[in-house]
Amino acid sequence: MATINVDVKNVLGTVTAEQIQSLNPEAAAGLDKLHNGTGLGSDFLGWVNLPSEITEAHLADIEATAKSLTDNCDYIVAVGIGGSYLGAKAVIEALADQFSQLRPQDDPRRCRVLFAGQNIGEDYLYELQDFLADKRFGIIVISKSGTTTEPAIAFRLLKEQLEKQVGKAEAAKRIVAITDAKKGALRQLATEEGYKTFIIPDNVGGRFSVLTPVGLLPIAAAGYDIRALVDGARRMEARTVEASDENPSLLYATTRNALYRAGRKIEIMVNYNPKLHFFGEWWKQLYGESEGKDHKGIFPASVDFSTDLHSMGQWIQDGERTIFETVLSVEEVAHRTIIPSDEANLDGLNYLAGKRVDQVNKMAELGTRIAHVDGGVPVIRVTIPALKEEYLGELIYFFEKACGISGYILDVNPFNQPGVEAYKRNMFALLEKPGYEAETAAIKSRI
């Protein structure tokens, strides 16, 4: 059966196989902590067995809710920030026709999923509301507390707009809240207004929440097969239980930490398929927020090749040797396009006539990998059979499991994010939020 695979042979000029294998005991200990809940952040391990614990009834409920939304809406706005939007965005973008937003909306089984609450851009919100002014739309609002600034502002604006366009009773049918089981402002509002709700499990952090309703409902509303997504994750869950040579998450975690200890402080996630741009964004949050603690951690960056070879390629090839690459390679693309012959051949491309565009792309990938390895850049290669739900489910769980193992090798808590609160405290003080009077006075004395 086709599956995700990891190839680390192109790192062996920087670290040895023995250096990678020497981390196996630490990785095995980290894996044991994940499975037995004995490590830092053990209150947030609900994602570890999540794929195998998802029930038929739960999937059916999500699918039924998605159908209710698609029956009544042409557009769904998913309101959330961080892990509350990046996972769904990554999967939808990987599966979607990249020009679907420009085509007529002619498939009643799916909605166009838009996103809000991931920024505080006034122009963004104005233009979104202006676009939705004459559209049939609904809202999926995602927040444990309901008070996170960015999504709370977006939801307040969109809720008011929807109620004005269709009335309060109809708006309540088009709003789904994904929130805490019992507490928080959004839970209270959902109860008062009668919104359909799903629970964000207390033991699953936002960046690990793609396979909860946080990700599954927007993905289902967009018309994609969440059962196949979950099935793929289940396969990878089973494949990563043992601390063995067959565990790809363990291999990835040990390899990247061996490179880190050898002075490679920056990991660049590389794709050669533009549909994977937002997968890189999801991966950056997963690893950056999980590992950047105690003045430790590999800095996660991402590039889209071959596009960024014409901007970042020079630095990657010849810049400071503090980097390594993880390349996402898609084996089979969805469509077939043949390069034609041209009689004049002014562009000199007739040597490519009759070849598929993807063949040219794959040779660009191979040539770049060789060039970068020759230039002193270690390359990990993660092979994906195709951009289909089942393989994306595998890929998501693969990276999640490796992230937990890697965090424990680094000896940090992979499941908290204390540093994120610093900007919020300053922002609240500058905005003179009630309860922040002392902080307001202190920060104003500095500006």
Image (cartoon, rainbow, N blue to C red):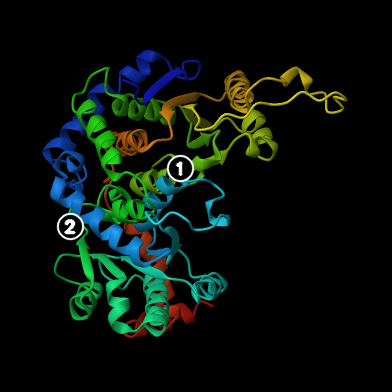
The image quarter containing residue 225 is top left
Residue 118 pos. (x, y %): 44, 63
- The N terminus, quarter of image: top left
Three-letter amino acid code of the residue under disc 1: Ala
Name the residue located 28 percent from the left edge and 63 percent from the top edge.
68
Q: Looking at the image, tell me whether mark 2 or mark 1 is earlier in sequence order.
A: 1
Judged left or right of residue 49, residue 154 is right
Judged left or right of residue 115, residue 184 is left
Residue 258 pos. (x, y %): 39, 26
Secondary structure at badge 2 equals loop
Query: Residue 202 got which mark?
Result: 2
- The C terminus, quarter of image: bottom right
Can the viewer see residue 425 in this picture? no
> What residue is shown with label 1?
94
The image quarter containing residue 249 is top left
Q: Is residue 180 above or below residue 219?
A: below
Q: Is residue 153 above or below residue 101?
A: below
Q: How many marks?
A: 2
Q: Is residue 446 above or below residue 394?
A: below
Three-letter amino acid code of the residue under disc 2: Asp
Secondary structure at badge 1 equals helix
Name the residue located 88 percent from the left edge and 25 percent from the top edge.
344
How many neighbours does mark 1 have within 10 angstroms: few (below 14), some (14-19), or many (20 or more)? many
Q: Nearer the viewer, residue 106 or 403?
A: 106
Q: Are marks 2 and 1 in contact (CB under 8 Å)?
A: no
Can the viewer see residue 5 in this picture? yes
Residue 11 pos. (x, y %): 47, 20
Q: Nearer the viewer, residue 305 or 233?
A: 233
Judged by depth in the image, the label closer to the viewer, 2 or 1, is: 1
